[in-house]
Image (spheres, rainbow, N blue to C red):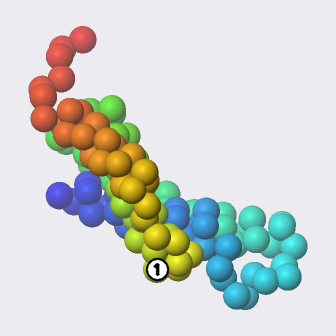
Amino acid sequence: MKTILLLVCSNVFMTLAWYGHLKFKFLEGKSLLVVILVSWSIALLEYCFMVPANRLGYLSGTFTGYQLKIIQECITLGVFVAFAWIVLKERLTWNYGVSFGLILLAVYFATAFRPGTP
């Protein structure tokens, strides 16, 4: 559970780094270099959560590398859906909902079965 919580925190910061600048009022009229530096600063916080999440999940034997990546992508989309709805004021349409559902199905298939031994 710690791995998942760390991944959620990580993705909140990454979503802010990648898309927050589209709505941050203090960045209006700023140069692209300033926007990139602000985004990198936020992304540093993302790494402070992502690296421990991956180490904890993988080194504990709880998740494989593939499972961590698939779970992380699903969390990324979940965080982005909330961000797009609340901050960007965009609604989730049926085609995006179906796409998201298919990714949730991928998480199920990635984690429901024991991986084979190499």
Question: Residue at 24% of width from left, 40% of height from top?
Answer: 105
Please identify the quarter of the rendering in which residue 9 is found: bottom left
Q: What is the number of callouts on the image?
A: 1
Q: Where is residue 14 in the image (x, y as percent from the top left)?
A: 52, 62
Please identify the quarter of the rendering in which residue 28 is found: bottom right
Q: Depth check: give the residue in front, 55 or 35.
A: 35
Q: Position of residue 1 (x, y in %)?
A: 17, 58
Q: Specify the quadrant that holds the C terminus.
A: top left
Q: Is residue 56 above or below residue 4?
A: above
Question: Residue at 35% of width from left, 48% of height from top?
Answer: 98
- The crowding category of the residue bearing disc 1, from other C-alpha atoms within 10 Å (few below 14, some 14 to 19, many at least 20), is few
Q: Position of residue 115 (x, y in %)?
A: 18, 23
Q: Where is residue 25 in the image (x, y as percent from the top left)?
A: 70, 88
Side of 2 relative to 85 (left or right): left
SS at mark 1?
helix
Q: In this view, does 2 lie above or below 106?
A: below
Asked whether the viewer can see residue 10, the reply is no
Question: Residue at 52% of width from left, 72% of height from top?
Answer: 90
Asked whether the viewer can see residue 97, the reply is yes
Q: Three-letter amino acid code at disc 1?
A: Ile
Q: Which residue lies furthest to the bottom in this view?
A: 26
Question: Residue at 43% of width from left, 61% of height from top?
Answer: 93
Say which residue label 1 marks. Answer: 86
Q: Which residue lies furthest to the front in this view?
A: 94
Side of 19 relative to 70 (left or right): right
